[in-house]
Amino acid sequence: MQIRVKSGDSLWKYSRVFQIPLKLILDSNNLDNPNQLMIGEVIQIPGYVTKSYTIKPGDTLWKIAGWYQAPLDGVLLLNDANPFALKPGEKVNIPIRVTWSLVNPIQNYDYNTLVTDVRKLLAVYPFIKQGVIGESVMGKPLPELVVGKGNKKVHMNASFHANEWLTSALLMKFIDDYARELTNSQMLSGVSLPPLYESTSLSLVPMVNPDGVDIVINGLPEEEPYRTLVDEINNGSNQFNRWKANVRGVDLNNQYPAKWEVEAKRKPTKPSPRNYPGKAPLTEPEAIAIADLSRRKKFDRALAFHSQGEVIFWGYEGLEPPESERLVTEYSRLSGYTGIRYVDSFAGYKDWFIKEFRKPGFTVEIGKGESPLPLSQFSKIYQDTIGIFLSSLYM
């Protein structure tokens, strides 16, 4: 919600009137001098939207504020109307506190849905910052969302594998709930959120493989040469539920230089709907983008969300630090998922992250069954994994 500064306004006043933490208002605005606002300057107030109301005979701002459970001072701040001389037909704006979910995860969560939801979140919670870390093969921008200002840096990503797109909906549900309850000074799953915001910078890349996700959900791409390429790789079948790869038939989670040669010897040797590691490590723009982001930001820990199995992989060749075991023990306690240290599978992002940085890296396999997991599992998966999300921020 936007407010135009009037004489006597201050950020502290906005914080008091709208009951929004001052820190979030500060972080929602790029102000040269937060202590000296300029009359007419536009200020972003997180956690609110505006509703237009047309004045009827007998209306007062006090009545209108009561009907919408809006702060009267907030209504006055938002409007230039004379509160003692309202005219029928005149329009006023009412500040409405957002207490509902902006993200609907119970749907086929393709790239367009992601982009729409990102836009909604940024409009209501402008303290969330968006960056673009690269593009997919087909040129789709890969968004990164960042929440929090702390020195601890935590990264999470989802949908490395196309038919595991439910993980994207999961991360977007996490950030929606986190931002809403943080703004409203409410706990999330019994956890106080302001200390997490202050201590931790959270980086989310909610859809690493948008081209692949769109193939699984929407079928063959319209654009050439990708339509013909995907059709050939899939042997002319219009069934894409087993498709894990990007649009070029490369498995993005087999793309990392962490015993890549071992995987290359036992995996498909040409583009395939699943498991082809490519001609060499880090040939695909999506995998490169995540690697570059990790090198640039030097995260303290990284969690890659996959499906399925209700397990958490956390080791690589003995290079994982002691902290990893402490974290996975807590993740397992909170989720019921089984921690597995080593597995005969390499070249994944988690493997490379541990090898490259000697920091805790995890692959969280949500749910059970065959991917794409049914939407009917989402509620249970969310309840199982919300503890992993939150404890990654406070531990």
Image (tube, rainbow, N blue to C red):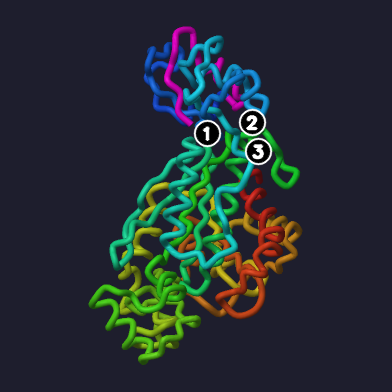
Image position, residue 340 (x, y; %): 66, 70
The local secondary structure at tag 1 comes to strand
Query: Would residue 382 be visible to someone looking at this image?
Result: yes
Q: Quadrant for residue 167, please give it.
A: bottom right
Per the image, the residue denoted by label 3 is 193
For label 3, the crowd category at 10 Å Cα-Cα, with few meaning under 14, some 14 to 19 and many 20 or more, is many
Instruction: Please state which of residues 66 and 374 is positioned toward the viewer in this rendering.
Output: 66
Q: Quadrant for residue 326, please give it.
A: bottom right
The local secondary structure at tag 3 comes to loop
Task: Give the residue type at disc 2.
Answer: Tyr
Q: Residue at x 59, y 66 (%)?
A: 315
Image position, residue 249 (x, y; %): 36, 79
Image position, residue 107 (x, y; %): 55, 65
Mark 2 or mark 3: name the one nearer the start of the chain.
2
Task: Give the residue type at disc 3.
Answer: Leu
Instruction: Please state which of residues 389 and 1 is positioned toward the viewer in this rendering.
Output: 1
CA–CA distance in space, label 1 to label 3: 28 Å
Nearer to us: label 1 or label 3 = 1
Q: Residue at x 33, y 61 (%)?
A: 140
Image position, residue 282 (x, y; %): 34, 68
Residue 51 numbered mark, or none: 1
For label 2, the crowd category at 10 Å Cα-Cα, with few meaning under 14, some 14 to 19 and many 20 or more, is few
Tell whether label 2 touches label 1 (CB within 8 Å).
yes
Task: Give the residue type at disc 1.
Answer: Lys
Magenta residues span: 1-21
Per the image, the residue denoted by label 2 is 68
